Image (cartoon, helix red, strand yellow):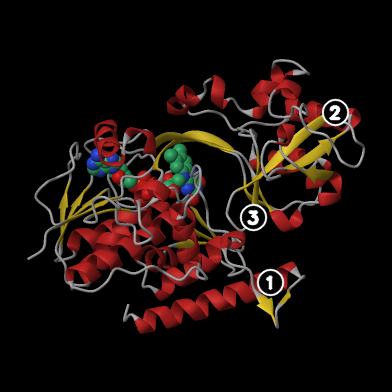
Amino acid sequence: MYKVAVIGGGLAGSEASYRLANEGIKVDLYEMRPKKLTPAHRTGKFSELVCSNSLGGREITTGAGLLKEEMRLLNSLILKIAEEHSVPAGGALAVDREKFSEDITKVLEEHENINVIREEITEIPKDYDFILIATGPLTSEKLSKEIQKLTGEEYLYFYDAIAPTVDAETVDYSKGFWGDRYNKGEGDYFNCVLTEEEYEKFYKELLKGKQVPLKDFERAVFFEGCLPIEEIARRGKQTLLFGPMKPVGLIDPKTGKQPYAVVQLRKENKEGTLLSLVGFQTKLKYPEQKRIFRLIPALKDATFVRLGSIHRNTFIQSHKVLKPTLQMKDFPNILFAGQITGVEGYVASASTGILAGINIARIIKGEEPLIFPKTTMLGALVNYITEPKKELQPMNPNFAILPDIKINGRKIKDKRKRKELKAKRALEDMKEFIEKNNL
Ligand SMILES: Cc1cc2nc3c(=O)[nH]c(=O)nc-3n(C[C@H](O)[C@H](O)[C@H](O)COP(=O)(O)OP(=O)(O)OC[C@H]3O[C@@H](n4cnc5c(N)ncnc54)[C@H](O)[C@@H]3O)c2cc1C
């Protein structure tokens, strides 16, 4: 009889335990709440939603919508209960949070194969055949130290300093140029150019931008190397021009001159479909980010696939530590799921819990663990966090991480149509994958 421990009864841990238990595998599910709360959780219930009660859009042409549809095909517990307790929310799936987590708790506590243990795990347990770590963005301090020992200190991060990311197809490339500072490199950066007048306008609006109030436990994350762009701006009108917007070493080939100010965009993935604004981590509210960053001429019509933020978030550098099966490269019997892997948000976290549950069950049954197709949103997300890169910053489900789609070798220009086709392909591929692997 195999012994499996799932650590953390959040969105990912709940899905994984449910999946394993339904496959007939006995699970010890460890959850430290309510004995010990995180700074954001308020109850002892499983899958507590710590902030918004929305699980994102329903339409399959949104990243969260498509991922939810795939999760439905994989018999997600979270989605089943969410539908039972949904509240009207336009195009989104929002839930009555109390009833939602109450019912998930009931299902898990009453499952004959799940043994709930209300305890903080402070050391990686030794007497299990498989361990799933799903302790989320607010993993307790003692366990974080243990995880650091497993992953190597440099591969566990304690905060996000996320700069906004745009869909590369929505950038106006006539308003800047490709090139590296002092021509050192392969021309990997796109430099969005601003004249003095454009900079002045941008600067004024940046100072006026409304910010998200900091939670007490988030105050500690600010330090010199990680200041929000608006805080740098408050130090004086010229400060940005010596910091993230400095033009020095960049010559615009159109004018032969150094621009007044520059915002550099850097490729976030191999395919170059995602570009992030270098050094633009921010605490501005989301609508304010869109309004203000679209004052950068090259980004006037940009689609933001992820907006900036700075908050506490415990997450590993999965591209160094994990295989796309969510097993550790060095210790294949230890798996990670949820936000701690570098995916972002309730739905993405839950989806990786399903994948981890499936893979542990398969290994126990003597089958190969699975890598999901990159054309599905779940597969693309896990591929994104585990593929080689310099540094992993958390990622949410979005269409730019899905491989491109062509008809008769031709690119599809219409954005809506492209999304529809990618979504259709994702669901077809997921169905085929489920059938082929008997999931
Ligand atoms: C302040 C805040 C606001 C957020 N707002 C949103 C939002 O509006 N929308 C959104 O989609 N996402 C939001 N998120 C992110 C969201 O909370 C996560 O994506 C999601 O909860 C992650 O699921 P998870 O299962 O990985 O972790 P969690 O849901 O956090 O579950 C992890 C569980 O592990 C337990 N645990 C931790 N350490 C230990 C230990 N040592 N031993 C035993 N148990 C332990 C915790 O108590 C917790 O129950 C927010 C996060 C924070 C911190």
Residue 400 drawn above or below residue 439: above
Foreground label between 1 and 3 = 3
Amino acid type of disc 2? Tyr
Q: Residue 260 carries which label?
A: 2
Mark 2 neighbour density, 10 Å: few (under 14) some (14–19) many (20 or more): some
Residue 28 drawn above or below residue 314: below
- Specify the quarter for ligand 1: top left
Q: What element carries label 2?
A: loop
Residue 413 image point, x, y percent: 77, 70
Residue 331 image point, x, y percent: 23, 51
Q: Is mark 1 on a helix, strand or loop?
A: helix
- Residue pictured at 38% horizontal, 34% vertical: 154
Q: How far apart are marks 2 and 3 (CA)?
A: 26 Å
Res 256 visible: yes
Compare marks 2 and 1 and give the one earlier in the sequence.
2
- Within 8 Å: ligand 1 and the Cβ of disc 1? no
- Within 8 Å: ligand 1 and the Cβ of disc 3? no
- Residue pictured at 14% horizontal, 45% vertical: 125
Mark 3 neighbour density, 10 Å: few (under 14) some (14–19) many (20 or more): some
Amino acid type of disc 1? Arg
Amino acid type of disc 3? Gly
Quarter of the figure with residue 157: top left
- Within 8 Å: ligand 1 and the Cβ of disc 2? no
Q: Is mark 3 on a helix, strand or loop?
A: loop
Quarter of the figure with residue 354: bottom left
Q: Which of 291 and 319 is in front in this view?
A: 319
Find out whether the residues at labels 2 and 1 contact each other: C-beta distance under 8 Å. Answer: no
Q: Mark 3 points at which residue?
A: 272
